[in-house]
Amino acid sequence: MEKVTKRVIFIGMSLLLLAAIIILGIQHFDTNYQEKIVQGSNEDQKEHTSSKYPGVGIVTSTQDIDGILIHEKYPEFSHDHLDRSMKKLVKNHRKDFSEEVGKIKDLKKSKIKPYYHMYFDITPLGEHIYSIVMHTEKNYATANAEIHSQPFLVDVQNDRILQMKNLFSEEDYTELTTFVLKELKKDPEKGQYIFDEAYKDFLNQHHLAERLVLNSDGAEFLFEPYSVGARAAGTPSVKLSLEELALYFTDEAVKRLGVLANNDLLQKGKKAVLARQAPELPENMPKVVTNNPKAGKKVALTFDDGPHPENTPAIMQLLKEHQAKATFFMLGSTADFYPELIQQVVEAGHEVGSHSWNHPQLSLLDEASIKNEVDLTDNVFKEAIGYAPNTLRPPYGDYDDRVSQLIDKPLVLWSIDTLDWKSRDPQAILAQVQSQLHDGAIILMHDIHDETVSGTALVLDYLDEQGYECVTVSELFE
Ligand code: NI
């Protein structure tokens, strides 16, 4: 062979080898991602808390896998069968997510990172029967997230998941399907986008009970986008009272409904609303704040992602001992479980802010979803303390002009990140504050972590020594 040909072959082979190494390397990298996603958080990264509902606890976990954010919140029941079913559900969702993430090309280069959120709504329907709707939101590095809701009933005393399907009498089911279609089409705006064919296809694959949500207002058939019509139909729904729904139930289920109708747990849930006024914000508070260096020797401690039934009161106790005030940016979906805790925070003279409903990256959401995140959270506060928070901390500090225009509250960022969620170490939390302390600083912490409580104690001592006063975020701008 000619020398030149040999050289060309050699270079060619080398390039092929290099390409193979790169491809294998990338694949290995992706498998790693997927493994981490499927594995989920370690047990010690999970927070287990109680809730206001007897027999129902909450598990929360947040994971950041190289920018892929996974936030899960699901119920636990201290009952084998229920907990196993729940864990299976959580696991399956993660598996689906990891498989789809594995299919994304150029994930490393992608500006939008995939994310996955799981959360749930719960409504008591009897002494130990709850209606639970699990929601998932999965984003695969595109502008739109896939949203999915799955309703079911649990009986926490008998360790049973009640299949809603079994509530319906077979004879009356066809009649119910006709009724629901008729109601869907009645919607003056969206009714025209409901299609008979799509509805028929849906019924071939699903039972209507899969879309049934029972709550204190009655019953609702809630369909996912595209499932029974065009995009313009949005998430179509049909609402009816429990009495109307009972027409299609078996005798046994009607008996059960009888229990539901006289359910005083539902009444107890409706707390008397305290007649309170929202505190006024200082006039010169900017639309987006990170700190206020003109504030003199004052700082604002802020606690995100709570409230937490043990840590939030523990932090409040420390604040009291130091005559310090702080701001708590609560997640609506968490605060919803602890109305009394919201009241206690406000009564102790602290400030409450919104941290959205479910901790998404707001800049990735459409207008309606952003409004929904804000409004749902506002409502939780209005019910608990009579007013909505007047500031909002965007999750991950993520916002853009559009988000800022849509949200009619100052957006509160921070100038000192204690990285408490990462270090889980009180000394490391203190070190972050020591190295960055400045006049008018806004300090970021998270009251969902146990270590942050001890960290707060150290920080408060240090701030005292340095002659700093702890005020709320809005007081920093007075
Ligand atoms: Ni947060």
Image: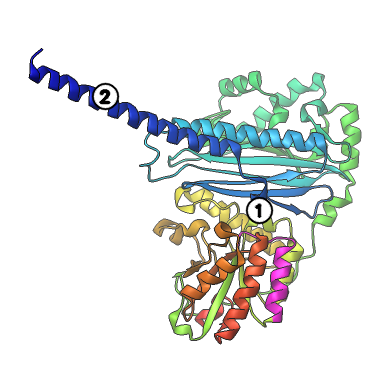
Residue denoted by label 1: 333
Residue nearest the viewer, comparing 196 with 390: 390
Residue denoted by label 2: 16
- The correct choice, above or below, for 7 with respect to 143 in the image is above
Disc on the earlier residue, 1 or 2:
2
Q: Residues within 10 Å of mark 1 (few under 14, many from 20)?
A: many
Which is closer to the viewer, label 1 or label 2? 2
Q: Which region shows up in magenta? A: 304-321
Would you say 333 lies left or right of 163 here? Answer: left
Tell me, for residue 250, which label it has, or none.
none
Task: Determine the secondary structure under disc 2.
Answer: helix
Residue shown at the point (61%, 44%) measured from the top left = 41
Where's residue 217, x and y in %?
76, 47
- The correct choice, above or below, for 22 with respect to 418 in the image is above
Where's residue 110, x and y in %?
38, 42
Q: Is residue 37 magenta?
A: no
Q: On the image, which quarter does residue 8 sit in?
A: top left
| Count of marks placed on residues | 2
Q: On the image, which quarter does residue 42 sit in?
A: top right
Residue projecting furthest to the top: 1
User: Looking at the magenta stretch, what is its main secondary structure?
Assistant: helix
